[in-house]
Amino acid sequence: MTTAGSEPGHINPGKVLSDTGDILKKSFATIWIVALILFIPVAILGYFSDQGWLINLIYSIATLVASLYMAGIVVRVVQDVEADGKVDASVGDLFGSITPKLWSILLLSIVTGILIVIGFFFFIIPGIILALMWLVAVPALVAEDLGVFAAMSRSSELTKGNRWRLIGVFILIYILLIVMGIIVALFVAITPILGVIIGLLLAIVIYPYVSIIIAVVYYELLEAKGESKPGPGVGTMAPPSGEMPA
């Protein structure tokens, strides 16, 4: 993806959203098949989640696993599209490439999530800064085959100088997630089955879109800094010196 109209070393948030739409068009079938595989079981569990604490726990774990898979697989999809304009990997290959990294993505999400929450506790601004700093940590971990802390460091390096340009993207992501939660809650209040259906529809639209935005930001940051882009596949870019992959 090109970044025409951006200043050297800086990304154009408008271009990020434009490229996100372009990638979504080129990967539409693959993305939604993956989303359906991940979120239909979650929706079914959600319908029964009020039947007891165990079902609710399983539902929560399934939701977490689905979102982690979605975030990782979308990075692979964007890698494919960036390479030749289309998705070459099969759905099975995409799942297979992310499964070995799932624990690393989980640990990364836990570490950054805890630190960001602590940051928000201290007058909000530090939390926003940390969220922007680590916005592309998951794409860095997946695309560059990095470990958890190396991915956090890499994301911090890539976003430096562009964090406040990304604030609009950051706000959009959180608005989408908040709106999804509100809509689902409203429909659940009407009838649980309707809430499950609407929740599933929103999940297969919003989760992939948010994940693509973040992956596109990663690629735009690489291009803005004049760095080569990792091609499709696992471990196509060597990690920085001294860092071991997960």
Image (cartoon, helix red, strand yellow):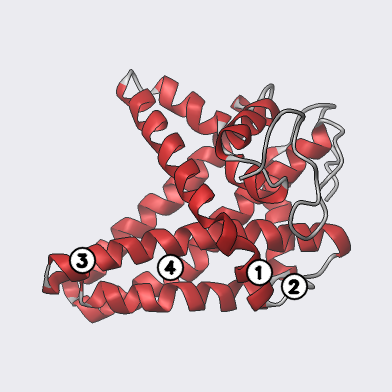
Judge whether 185 appears above or below 153 on screen: below
Above or below, 44 against 216 in this view is: below
The residue sitting at 41% across, 52% down in the picture is 177
Q: Circle 2 sits on which residue?
A: 89
Q: In the image, what residue occupies the spot 43% across and 62% down?
A: 65
- Can residue 161 be seen at all in this image of the molecule? yes
At x 43%, y 36%, the residue is: 111
For badge 2, the amino acid type reads Ala
CA distance for labels 1 and 3: 28 Å
Q: Is residue 223 above or below residue 10?
A: below
| Residue that carries the numbered disc 3 in the rendered image | 56
Foreground of the two, 44 or 231: 231
**Looking at numbered disc 4 in the image, what kind of residue is underneath it?**
Leu
Mark 3 and mark 2 in contact? Answer it, CB < 8 Å. Answer: no
Tell me where residue 77 appears, x and y as whole percent. Answer: 70, 63
The answer to the question of whether label 2 and label 1 lie on touching residues, with beta carbons closer than 8 A, is: yes
Q: Distance between the Cα atoms at labels 2 and 1?
A: 6 Å
Residue bearing the label numbered 4: 202
Sort mark 2 into few (<14), some (14-19) or many (20+) by Cα contacts within 10 Å.
Answer: some
Q: Label 4's element?
A: helix
